[in-house]
Amino acid sequence: MSPLASYLFVPAHREGWVQKAVAAGAHAVILDLEDSVPDAEKQRARVQAAESIRWLRTHHPEVGALVRPNALDTGLAEDDLAACVVDGLGALLLPMIRTADDVRAFSALVDTAEQASFGSVSGRVGLIPSLETAQSVAHCESLATASPRVRSLQSAVARGGDVERELGFEWTADGLETIYYRSRAVLACRAAGLGHPLVGVWQDLDDLAGLERFALQNRRLGFRGQLLIHPSHCRTVNEVYGATPADLDRCRRLVAAYETAADRGLGAVDFEGEHIDIAHVKTALAVLERNGEA
């Protein structure tokens, strides 16, 4: 997956909201066909979602386009994918996943939709299982490897959400009660070679200081992007997950210092009072790559 920080939910049936998301600085837009769309609006939402994906591809190809379809057991997912698997769609955020079989079932539906839309099964549309059930958290490792389409996992730890009800924890702003669940998602992603684990969401629309603390904790745990429910949260999350100019400059100096030492036949060097070796260089290079300096 691309190194995008902010993934903003947009109710798919709301015209003009994708444009507002882009204006707010969202790195990616999640067109929601599930919880935020009333039953009577589902079909119109599908049509509008496809139009929004095409608009993004034409006018803002740098902004990721995702869709959250309805869950498998609703009987709506197949129609969701038939309408929304169009050129420009990057991935599906999969709701209420419980087992690897659920991921594979979605993958098969995408195969059919890609064949109908593109004339072949291209594999271009990725899958991001959302860990919002007890089973999905318990079996997150198998979800990460359930299909070649899986691009990431999303640890859903929002206040009052499905996972709080299923797991029985009591949500706090400090987040200590969900650190284990979030860490499981990061580990499962990394072990499967998925380098961009995602987390969501911060519910308090006005508490930007709390959002910043939550985002910083998640970044330190290893997450690389965060799902959002309000445009006002984009700037904070983009800043927290992005490296500062000072961070990038330090990484450049570290790499340069090691390369100078390597030219002299040294495998380790004292860099500004810190012992570094090739492992530190690889970490610094990864930071530079995530921030567009490959």
Image (cartoon, rainbow, N blue to C red):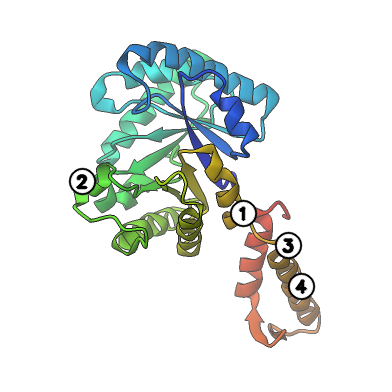
Mark earlier in primary sequence (1, 4)? 1
Q: How much space separates mark 1 and mark 4, taking CA atoms?
A: 22 Å
Near mark 1 (Cα within 10 A), the count class, few <14, some 14-19 or many ≥20, is some
Mark earlier in primary sequence (3, 4)? 3
- In the drawing, does residue 257 fall left or right of residue 285? right
Q: Is residue 247 above or below residue 133?
A: below
Residue highlighted by disc 1: 239
Mark earlier in primary sequence (2, 1)? 2
Q: Answer with the quarter of the image where residue 187 lies.
A: bottom left
Residue at 53%, 45% in the rendered image? 233
Residue at 48%, 12% in the rendered image? 47
Residue highlighted by disc 2: 165
Residue highlighted by disc 3: 245
Q: Are marks 3 and 4 in contact (CB under 8 Å)?
A: no
Q: Are marks 1 and 3 in contact (CB under 8 Å)?
A: no
Residue highlighted by disc 4: 253
